[in-house]
Structure formats: structure tokens, C-alpha cells
Amino acid sequence: MDIFVIQGGRPLQGTVRTAGAKNSCLPMLAAALLTEETLELENVPDLSDVRSMLGILEVLGAKVERSGTSVALRTEPSAQPVAPWDLVRKMRASFEVFGPLLGRRGRAEVSYPGGCSIGVRPVDAHIRGFEALGAIVRTREGYVVAEAPPGGLPGGEAYLATSSGSSVGATRNVMMAAVLARGRSVLSCAACEPEVVDLANCLNAMGAKVHGAGSPTIEIEGVEALHGARHAVVPDRIEAGTYVVAGAITGGRVRVEACRPEHLTALLDALYRAGVGLERGRDWIETQPRDPRERLRPTDITTQPYPGFPTDLQAQWMALMALADGVSVITERIFPDRYMHLAEILRLGARIRRQETAAVVEGVPALSGASIMASDLRASAALVLAGLVAQGQTKVHRVYHIDRGYERIEERLSALGASIWREPDTDSPPL
Ligand code: EPU
């Protein structure tokens, strides 16, 4: 296991390019199971989650060729449509092979993904959706097993609401099952996230007929077969947002290029309210330098489904507000227990208390470096951001979490002038 060592206190300056979106790319790779022809994806980020998904797809019969940021996949449908626990447990997104397997092969057997450090994360909405399309679904020995009637799924009307609104994963999974159904399907209370739209665009390039993605109602006309296609993955709005917050927290001038500012409206609005100077163009955002003595205004946020403030930027926002000039309230409406980073940020001298699903952040004038532990992907990003401004040295342990979703973050931050490097962990703190 590696750690990041960060020497805090340097304002960042320079340009960083956004990679393709992890959360768009993972289900899109699974969409290769829907055709026997080649699906070629461009702008695929180099992440450990992508490697995990490619490993699962190989078990399911995919031949994978990777060159730079493109990945070509071609699937032989001979392998068993079974995704085992030892692979699925590593990454929840692997449950999204379910829809393609069920849609094309008429049968799928995928291990329950289980919970993780951000919460319980059930899959009931996925299962309700498959049932609405006409599958018989049951649970057997820790696996979700689904079968389509002879001749394939008929299609149907699926209502995908969850306690927090919609489900990104269920919308994509059920959409992928529906594209090869015999008839028409309607997904209501569908998630509107850009990653859902990107997947729909990719499926349509493969010959699917998906209409309305990006709205709460998606209509899908089933087609007989999908064909090969080439598609470029949308830029990662969460990675881009994290670098924008890196600019804001250090008071530096960071220009984030190759991003889609319109996918980050809620974050940009919160940054304006906090007093961060910003410039933006069609595909870039730039933070404006700020005197380090000038503190930001405390600014409340509530995480919500898109286009609301993304839960995947909540931890980063907490790091920013930890230094604001007053009290701000962060309310988590998507994953009410997604607060593993809170205790670690406290170790840097922040003043934050949890109140049910909210965190009350009392900004302090400065943080001071310490050894802290990453618990999940976005939590680790927040700890790195806090380390960039903490006085002295911060050591972030268990950075494999961050490698799941950020391409070589330490190299990119170093290129922006941060003092951060990776080392093998010789003294991992106890759990
Ligand atoms: N939910 C249910 N039942 C379900 C599915 C979800 O109750 O069957 C609930 C969840 O418990 C949660 C809410 O619905 O309260 C939203 O969950 P969703 O299904 O939308 O999340 P997901 O698809 O599992 C994706 C991203 C997450 C991101 C969430 C929310 C991928 C691979 N993952 O997860 O990304 O936080 O949407 O936007 O797309 C990350 O990148 O760090 C990450 C965790």
C-alpha cells in the first residue's frame, strides 16, 4: 500500500486536463456485452476501477484491446453469464453487467454487490426494473439470478424511484436490459445524470432506440440486435470539480481544461456564493488567485440528484468549508452516512460535527498536517485537498482508494506546483 506525503501551503498554478468520466465509462464498457461486434471507446481513463471492469468482462467472454486512451471490446457469447462474488465485491459498478447479460443472453447471475464505506447501497430498484421488463428474478446463495421468458424480455414500464430520488445505476442497468427487448419500455423516475445520457448516446450509436435520456422519463424501443460503434466518453465532471476546488482551497489560479462546465452548475454556484473568483469558457473553468489571508464565505450545500450538488463532491466541499470564515451546513441526501472523511479532517484541526444527515462545519483559520486515512474514493480526494493547505506535512494513507477514480492525481497536482509525492506505506495506522 502507498501513501501520499504532502507539504502544504503552496497556491496551485497551471493547467490540468480532465480525463474521461469513470462513472460513464464503467457501464459503457459493460455495454460491449450487448453485441458480438466491436465496441471502441475513446477517452477511457487509466484507473484501477476500469481495470477491474475489464477483468470481469474478460470472464464474461470479452476480448479486450487497449491502446492509450482507447479500448476495443468484442464479446464471444460462449462464456457463462455469471459474475462471481470475488470480482463483483471489489467494485459496485460491476453489478451493471446484469442488464446487458439479461438483455442479450436472457439470463444473468450476478453476486449481490453488498454495502461499502459510503452506505448500505441496495439494488432493489435494479431488481424491480428487471421484473417490470418481464424477467423472473430471485436471490440464490448471495446471487441475484434473473431469467427472461423464452424469446427474450418483452419490455415494460419500470418505476425506478428510490428513497433519495432516482438511481443512476438502476437507470443504466435497466436501460441496457431494455434495448434488446421485444417491445417498448418506459423508465420513469429515471436518473438524469450526464453519465446516463452518455450511455444512452453510446447505445444509440450501437443501433439502440433510446429517447429522453437526461429527463426523468426514458422511452426505449427494443431492437433485434446492436452493432459495433465508436464512442468518446464524456469528461469526468467530478474529477474536473475536484481540481477546481483544489484551485479554490489553495487560492491559486488553476485552469481545468477539456471539461463540461454545464455539468458543474451546482458546484460553480456554490463557489460563487463562497466568494471564489471564477472564469469559464465552453470547455474550461479557471479559479482566480486569492490572497491567502482572505477567507471564503461559509456556504451551505445539500447533495441531490443531478443537476443538484453531487454527492461525489460533498467531501471536497467539506475540506473547503473547513477553512471558511464562519459556519456552514452540509446536508447529504443521497448517501446519508457518507461522512467517513469527517473524523480524518478533524485530525487536521478542523471543527466539524455531525447532526444526523448533516455536518456543521465551523471554519478555522488554518489546518495543521497529520497522518490521516482514506476510506473511500471521494473521501481521499478531500483529504488530499485538505493536505494541500494544511501547515506542515500531511500523510494520507490507503491511497489505493484514490487510484480507483483519479488518474495519477499526485503527478497532476505536482504539475500545478503542489508538493506531493507517493511512497510505500511503512507504518499504516491501525484500522
Ligand atoms: N438506491 C436504492 N436502491 C437501489 C439503488 C440505489 O435505494 O436499487 C439508493 C442508494 O442507496 C442511494 C441512492 O439510491 O441512496 C442513489 O444511488 P445510485 O444508485 O444513484 O448510486 P450508484 O449508481 O450506485 C453512482 C456512482 C456513485 C455516485 C452515485 C450517486 C457509478 C459507478 N457510481 O452510484 O459514484 O455517488 O451514483 O450519484 O456511477 C464515486 O464515483 O465515488 C461514486 C460513489
Image: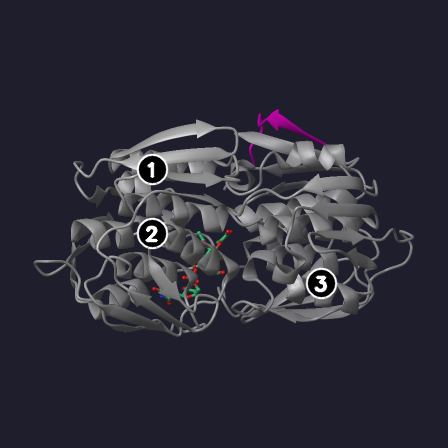
> According to the image, label 3 marks what residue?
268
Viewed as shown, does residue 384 lie left or right of 100? Answer: right
Q: Residue furthest left?
A: 150
Count of numbered circles on the image: 3
Q: CA distance from mark 1 to mark 2?
A: 19 Å
* For residue 183, above or below residue 345: below
Viewed as shown, does residue 363 lie left or right of 96? Answer: right
Which circle, 1 or 2, is nearer the viewer?
1
**Can you tell which mark lies on residue 133?**
none
Viewed as shown, does residue 146 lie left or right of 211? Answer: left
* For residue 132, above or below residue 389: below
Task: In this rendered view, identify the residue nearer to me: 168 or 203.
Answer: 203
Which circle, 3 or 1, is nearer the viewer?
1
Q: Secondary structure at mark 1?
A: loop
Q: Earlier in the sequence, mark 3 or mark 1?
A: 1
Which residue is located at x 7 percent, y 58 percent?
150
**Can you tell which mark lies on residue 96?**
2
Residue 318 spot, x, y in % from top left: 67, 59
Which residue is located at x 63 percent, y 44 percent?
18
Q: What residue span does the magenta drawing correspond to?
A: 420-430
Residue 10 spot, x, y in % from top left: 83, 40
Task: In this rendered view, identify the residue nearer to me: 287 or 367.
Answer: 287
Q: Identify residue type, mark 3.
A: Leu
The answer to whether residue 63 of the structure is visible from this angle is yes
Query: Is 425 one of the magenta-colored residues?
Result: yes
Q: Identify residue type, mark 2.
A: Glu
Q: Residues within 10 Å of mark 3 (few under 14, many from 20)?
A: many
> According to the image, label 1 marks what residue?
38
Q: Earlier in the sequence, mark 2 or mark 3?
A: 2
